[in-house]
Image (cartoon, helix red, strand yellow):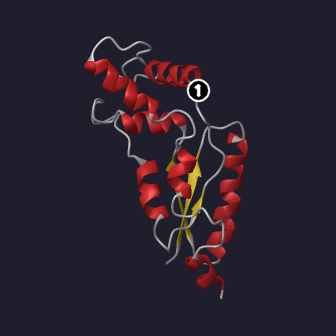
Amino acid sequence: MSKILYTLTDEAPALATYSFLPIVQAFAAKAGVTVETRDISLSGRILAAMSDVLPSDQAAHDALAELGALAKTPDANIVKLPNISASIPQLKAAIAELQGLGFDLPNYPDEPANQVEKELKARYDKVKGSAVNPVLREGNSDRRAPKAVKSYAQ
């Protein structure tokens, strides 16, 4: 059975992201295609980047790495919705929000004082900016319909 991976994001059109999903699922179901979701929101990327320092019940799957590997395959069907290109203030706000929800995350070190803080800053810096687009476009930058979509349509 064919499968589509649908990204959950936190950009301004989050309402559109969540309201469009049932439409995609309804159309896909009629065609015998399953739809699965993957969380590539800023919060999801933070939790994935820090999952080795979090308790096991708070650790998150690195959906962006999974999708990046999948994007390089000819059978990939990924619906990538708009996502946040996080600035440092947005990153800090997301960390604070997650901490407020009980996630045991370290603060973002503005001015690292030692090697541990430098490594922590580097890990956080990987999830800010436009972290998603280069990863997912690596395998599909030509914007043509993937082979799996063409084959299924025929």
Q: Which type of secondary structure does the marked residue at label 1 adopt?
A: loop
Looking at the image, residue 145 lies above or below residue 24? below
Quadrant assignment, res 66: bottom left
- Left or right: where does residue 10 sit relative to residue 126? right
Q: Nearer the viewer, residue 6 or 132?
A: 132
- Percent of width and height locating residue 149: 61, 77
- Percent of width and height locating residue 73: 46, 70
- Percent of width and height locating residue 35: 56, 64
Quadrant assignment, res 10: top right
Residue type pointed to by label 1: Ser
Looking at the image, residue 74 lies above or below residue 108? below
Q: Nearer the viewer, residue 86 or 38?
A: 86
Q: Residue at x 40, y 22 (%)?
A: 102
Total number of numbered labels?
1
- Left or right: where does residue 115 sit relative to residue 68? left
Q: Residue at x 56, y 67 (%)?
A: 77
Q: Nearer the viewer, residue 131 or 77?
A: 131
Is the C terminus in the top left, top right, bottom left or bottom right quadrant? bottom right
Q: Residue at x 64, y 70 (%)?
A: 28
